[in-house]
Image: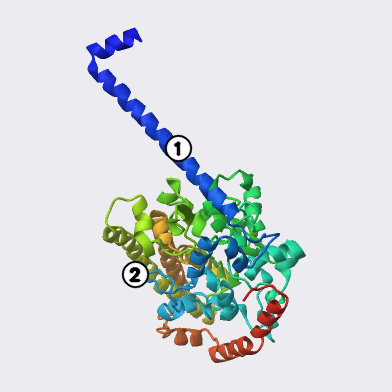
């Protein structure tokens, strides 16, 4: 101590350094104490406010809301449809009407009938029951989708899987569980009722990790804030006759990794009715693209941007109105980025504009490729002569779909999304060159493109009787769907 005192006397700045370090330590300890106190207050409030016991897999969100009113009240706002940015939002949009080329791209697949922009979680049940893609359960059984289509729509799904078994649930017809799957995406999808910790309720994600040699129970709390989203916001397919929900991640998360997985299985979702190409339909690979983007690489989770923290009466909680971060830039982007709201929004628009410029070109050229292939078949093309072109069409459309089916991929991973779209356009033009070669050998000098300037014209061209499809579905919605709801209400499966 004497030597230290002498050093300070001869070198006064040492004293200031010690003072600064002491203050920093005191400040750090204060922050730690405040954090511990805040967390204890949150935990105490969590248990003190419990008014009902949530037991088992309780799919009724309203009952969870009795204990957790703040989170529940923000979750109810997923029903709002009052936000639109330049390209995204939570408003209703008929995407096929906006981009009718997509009707032709999905010829022979249910998406050519109906494809609307996704809405909030509160609409999950309504949207899957009303869409033309799920067919008409009253009489069109050959057109019916499997029960696997319910997998991401409701907390009733893990309840039914527990009651019936996972395999039995998947392989049933979609209509078989109509009076059981009645509560929209909510609390029990992501939370353990005892501790409120985040939990995985869908076996497909756990199984995908296991096949990669990973244990999902080792995930950190921050990783879980993305993994609960990854139960649904991913690429998947229905494997085998049992339509078992499977994530194609065995080889990795890139578009090429998953394409190789499907190729090894000789798998296709459908055969295109115009080009006869064996097609792949991407679902919504949001998690996979997010992992390849700058925010995930810096340790952020989905919830950091889509479920920002709020404070009320000294209590901190997550906003469960899961929506575009652009709806509330001050609580999302500006918590990290020291820039104006206008600049931050314009950065996003710049990414989106550039990606959509390429996307629009692909949709136009890919539609031409399918028509060129149809023309070649109609002119008597041999299968051997068409194989290269059909493989290129499959690869091109898979890449296009992978990029555009993702919710916000052009922002989550702008460089990767642009790369995928560039490869899609390249393969599309390669397919056209291959088809021109085939058409030349057949003596076909000109390919007449159909008028697909509107959704109705495009659907007529691919042979859809939309009047009948719409009439049948509306009749079912009016006459049969209410019986599902009444049965569920009478059995106490829904609150209201």
* 459 sits left or right of 136 in the view: left
How far across and how far down the image is residue 313, in percent? 44, 55
Q: Quadrant of residue 123?
A: bottom right
Spot occupied by residue 187 in the image (x, y as percentages of width and height): 59, 62
For disc 1, the marked residue is 32
Tag 1 near tag 2, CB within 8 Å: no
Residue 419, above or below 482: above
Q: Which image quarter holds the N terminus?
A: top left
Residue shown at the point (34%, 60%) measured from the top left: 348
Q: Residue at x 28, y 11 (%)?
A: 7
Q: Is residue 312 depicted above or below 220 in this figure? A: below
Q: CA distance from mark 1 to mark 2?
A: 42 Å
> Could you say whether the residue bearing mark 1 is in a helix, strand or loop?
helix
* Residue 269 visible within the image: yes
Residue 424 picture quarter: bottom left
In this view of the protein, can residue 290 be seen by the observer?
A: no
Residue 207 place in picture, x, y as percent: 66, 53
Relative placement, left or right, of 139 versus 277 is right
Which mark sits nearer the N-terminus, 1 or 2?
1
Q: Position of residue 393 (x, y in %)?
A: 49, 68
Q: Please state which of residues 165 and 53 is positioned toward the viewer in this rendering.
A: 53
Up-down: is 200 above or below 93? above
Q: Residues within 10 Å of mark 2 (few under 14, many from 20)?
A: few
Judged by depth in the image, the label closer to the viewer, 1 or 2, is 1
Vertical arrangement, residue 228 with respect to residue 273, above or below:
above
- Residue for badge 2: 86
Q: Which mark is residue 198?
A: none
């Amino acid at each position: 101590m004497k030597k230290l005192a002498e050093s300070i006397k001869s070198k006064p700045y040492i004293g200031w350094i010690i003072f600064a370090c002491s203050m920093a330590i005191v400040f750090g300890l204060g922050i730690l104490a405040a954090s511990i106190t805040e967390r204890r207050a949150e935990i105490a409030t969590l248990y003190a406010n419990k008014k009902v016991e949530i037991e088992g897999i309780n799919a009724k969100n309203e009952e969870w809301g009795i204990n957790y009113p703040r989170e529940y009240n923000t979750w109810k706002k997923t029903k709002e449809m009052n936000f639109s940015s330049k390209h995204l939002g939570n408003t209703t949009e008929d995407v096929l009407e906006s981009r009718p080329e997509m009707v032709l791209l999905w010829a022979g697949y249910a998406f050519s009938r109906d494809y609307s922009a996704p809405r909030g979680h509160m609409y999950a049940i309504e949207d899957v029951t009303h869409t033309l893609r799920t067919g008409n359960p009253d009489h069109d059984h050959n057109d019916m989708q499997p029960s696997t289509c319910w997998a991401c729509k409701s907390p009733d799904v893990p309840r039914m899987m527990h009651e019936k078994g996972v395999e039995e649930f998947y392989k049933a017809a979609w209509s078989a569980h109509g009076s059981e799957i009645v509560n929209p995406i909510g609390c029990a999808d992501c939370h353990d009722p005892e501790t409120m910790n985040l939990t995985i309720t869908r076996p497909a994600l756990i199984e995908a990790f296991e096949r990669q040699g990973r244990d999902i129970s080792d995930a950190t709390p921050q990783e879980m804030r993305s993994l609960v989203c990854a139960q649904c916001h991913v690429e998947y397919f229905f494997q085998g006759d049992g339509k078992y929900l499977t994530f194609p991640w065995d080889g990795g998360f890139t578009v090429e990794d998953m394409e190789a997985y499907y190729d090894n299985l000789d798998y296709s979702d459908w055969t295109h009715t115009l080009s006869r190409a064996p097609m792949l339909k991407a679902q919504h690979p949001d998690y996979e693209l997010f992992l390849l983007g700058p925010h995930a690489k810096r340790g952020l989770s989905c919830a950091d941007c889509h479920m920002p923290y709020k404070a009320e009466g000294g209590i901190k909680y997550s906003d469960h109105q899961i929506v575009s971060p652009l709806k509330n830039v001050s609580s999302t982007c500006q918590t990290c980025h020291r820039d104006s709201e206008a600049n931050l929004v314009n950065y996003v628009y710049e990414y989106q504009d550039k990606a959509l410029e390429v996307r629009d070109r692909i949709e136009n050229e890919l539609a031409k490729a399918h028509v060129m292939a149809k023309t070649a078949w109609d002119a008597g093309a041999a299968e051997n002569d068409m194989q290269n072109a059909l493989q290129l069409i499959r690869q091109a459309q898979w890449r296009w779909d992978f990029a555009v089916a993702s919710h916000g991929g052009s922002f989550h991973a702008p460089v990767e999304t642009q790369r995928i779209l560039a490869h899609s356009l390249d393969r599309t033009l390669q397919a056209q060159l291959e088809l021109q070669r085939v058409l030349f050998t057949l003596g076909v000098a000109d390919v007449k493109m159909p008028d697909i300037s509107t959704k109705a014209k495009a659907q007529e061209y691919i042979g859809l009787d939309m009047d009948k499809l719409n009439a049948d579905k509306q009749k079912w919605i009016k006459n049969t769907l209410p019986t599902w709801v009444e049965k569920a209400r009478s059995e106490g499966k829904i609150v209201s």
